[in-house]
Image (cartoon, rainbow, N blue to C red):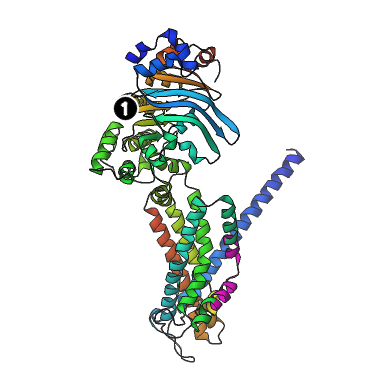
């Protein structure tokens, strides 16, 4: 074997090892976090965590039932606000807008997506909290919903655009108007992708803490209706993790595990929905 | 058949090359034209694709458009139900008539209900077999039973026997050839007066192709057909009339047997004998 060939073999093996190693590191970071969370959260979690309110400071035990429900309410209201706007905006962008308008909207959406979540929180604070004169579920949901808009908008647009042109032509050749084609062929063909993206957006905002700090604020009791401050899992994790009490640290781990479980459930739900329906095969 | 008899070899030269000649009128008189293309020029942006096209699509017959790649045959076909309008830079001059009415002045969706289209690659919707065929009747609010319409269309497309027991399965579970027949059934379900087929067999195997060719011959009792094909043998097998296009012009348009046996233009002869294309 010539020196040159030997050098090339060595280089090939070196690069192969390096890329493999980097892949291993990225995967193991995830498993390390998961394992740590499972261990610490798993040993701390109990039935009371799901059913009871937080105990007064100084007492051990209690749970985060109000935060679990609070997070669920926040996510529900955020989706009701953010998803329709993002979805319909995405349809406009993909199907109706001039390319100049589209690029402005698309660019703005990307900017909005990049706005730090704490800034979104300040915005929601001044738009909702100040006029209502108190923190509320509504204000928190507004902040989270705002964060869902660009993700939903961009992914709706992408998935609508990726629907093969020949399906569009097929519908139009049958005498379907543009609106009819979109509603009866394009959106149904893309809905699996769009739904996945919406659920991933939901999973992303489910873990957001900063925009909730001064919108939903927090509450150690049940929040009735939509206009009271509410507890939420991320804010509870934040509050409990920085506290000086061991029992609160334990509960913060448990809350982390529950939050992860919630996101896992959302993902499984997405996949279940996706496995029904009929996918457009890639060609 | 009478149309073959009516177009005598001696007249063919005139029929083909120029429109509006006595010979052309004679053909049109002996056989009613469902669609007439008059002095059509077509552009994508500034690039001209079709040059002064004059021809007709005979009622209840199969008309084939042949020619080498890029000759404009698909573009010409797509103007017949105004599918060219999906490209915003396109521009069409001239007139295309359906039953003596200018289609360019009509509502485009109702035009497309009358002039259906089947595409090069099978394009079933991501829906069940039944819902694919039912799509047209549903959106067009056809009176009567949808399931009867679906069965009738699937029978016309010679697909019924193969799919009747699993109408609610995904259309993508069918083979390529079955998918294309499903697309034909879907087009037939709106009962079009003219059916356009844009190289419907180019993505299919020989057996599926044979089935579709057989089908086309059956279907001309039902509807008027225009088919684009790059396969000369296919044009010879299924069509009654053939137009040969080259660089955006109709070089020759005659009854099919005549075009393949006694072409009047040397370029046609060169093409059908395989000297180019």
Q: At which x and y percent is residue B270?
A: 53, 14
Callout 1: helix, strand or loop? helix
| Magenta stretch, residue numbers | A109-126
Please say if A182 is above or below B184: below
| Residue situated in front as seen by the camera: A262 or A205 | A205
Q: At which x and y percent is residue A222?
A: 41, 83
| Residue situated in front as seen by the camera: A172 or B163 | A172
Q: Residues within 10 Å of mark 1 (few under 14, many from 20)?
A: some
Q: At which x and y percent is residue A78?
A: 46, 70
Give the image quarter of residue B200: top left
Which residue extends farthest right? A3
Chain to which the residue tagged by mark 1 belongs: B
Q: How many marks are shown on the rendered structure?
A: 1
Please say if B255 is above or below A124: above
Identify the residue at image location x=49%, y=91%. Answer: A57
| Residue situated in front as seen by the camera: B5 or A52 | B5
Identify the residue at image location x=49%, y=76%. Answer: A139
Q: At which x and y percent is residue A100?
A: 59, 52
Quarter of the picture containing the C terminus of chain B is: top right
Judge whether residue B69 can be spotted in this image: no
- Residue B6 belongs to the span the image colors magenta: no
Q: Which residue is mark 1?
A: B219
Quarter of the picture containing the N terminus of chain B is: top left
């Amino acid at each position: 074997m010539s020196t040159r060939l030997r050098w090339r073999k060595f280089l090939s093996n070196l690069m192969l090892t390096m890329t493999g190693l980097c892949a291993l590191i990225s995967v193991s970071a995830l498993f390390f976090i998961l394992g740590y969370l499972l261990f610490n959260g798993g040993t701390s979690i109990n039935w009371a965590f799901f059913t009871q309110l937080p105990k007064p400071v100084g007492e051990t035990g209690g749970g985060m039932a109000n935060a679990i429900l609070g997070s669920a309410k926040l996510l529900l209201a955020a989706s009701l606000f953010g998803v329709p706007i993002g979805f319909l905006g995405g349809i406009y962008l993909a199907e109706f807008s001039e390319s100049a308008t589209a690029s402005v909207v698309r660019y703005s959406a990307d900017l909005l997506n990049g706005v730090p979540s704490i800034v979104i929180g300040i915005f929601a604070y001044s738009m909702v909290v100040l006029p209502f004169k108190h923190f509320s579920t509504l204000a928190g949901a507004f902040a989270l919903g705002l964060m869902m808009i660009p993700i939903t908008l961009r992914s709706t647009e992408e998935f609508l655009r990726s629907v093969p042109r020949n399906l569009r032509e097929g519908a139009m050749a049958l005498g379907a108007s543009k609106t009819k084609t979109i509603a009866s062929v394009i959106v149904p063909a893309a809905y699996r992708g769009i739904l996945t993206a919406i659920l991933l957006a939901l999973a992303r905002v489910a873990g957001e803490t900063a925009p909730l700090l001064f919108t939903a604020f927090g509450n150690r009791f049940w929040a009735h209706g939509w206009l009271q401050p509410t507890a939420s899992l991320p804010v509870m994790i934040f509050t409990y993790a920085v506290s000086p009490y061991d029992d609160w640290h334990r509960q913060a781990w448990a809350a982390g595990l529950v939050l992860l479980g919630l996101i896992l459930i959302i993902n499984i739900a997405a996949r279940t929905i996706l496995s029904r329906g009929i996918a457009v095969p890639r060609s | 058949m009478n149309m073959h008899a009516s177009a005598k070899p001696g007249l063919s030269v005139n029929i083909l090359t120029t429109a509006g000649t006595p010979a052309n009128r004679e053909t049109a008189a002996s056989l009613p034209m469902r669609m007439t293309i008059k002095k059509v020029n077509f552009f994508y942006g500034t690039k001209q694709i079709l040059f002064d096209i004059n021809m007709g699509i005979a009622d209840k017959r199969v008309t084939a458009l042949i020619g080498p790649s890029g000759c404009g045959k698909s573009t010409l076909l797509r103007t017949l139900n105004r599918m060219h309008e999906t490209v915003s830079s396109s521009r069409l001059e001239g007139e295309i008539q359906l039953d003596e009415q200018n289609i360019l002045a009509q509502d485009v969706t109702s035009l497309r209900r009358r002039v259906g289209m089947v595409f090069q690659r099978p394009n079933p919707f991501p829906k069940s077999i039944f819902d694919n065929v039912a799509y047209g009747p549903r959106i067009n609010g056809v009176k009567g039973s949808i399931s009867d319409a679906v069965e009738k269309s699937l029978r016309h497309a010679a697909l019924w026997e193969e799919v009747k027991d699993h109408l609610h399965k995904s259309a993508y579970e069918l083979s390529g050839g079955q998918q294309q027949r499903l697309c034909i059934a879907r087009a037939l379900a709106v009962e079009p007066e003219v059916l356009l087929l844009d190289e419907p067999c180019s993505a299919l195997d020989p057996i599926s192709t044979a089935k579709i060719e057989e089908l086309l011959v059956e279907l001309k009792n039902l509807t008027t057909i225009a088919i684009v094909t790059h396969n000369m043998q296919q044009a010879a097998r299924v069509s009654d009339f053939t137009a040969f296009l080259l660089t955006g012009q109709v070089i020759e348009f005659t009854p099919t047997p005549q075009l393949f046996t006694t072409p009047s233009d040397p370029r046609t002869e060169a093409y059908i004998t395989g000297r180019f294309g």
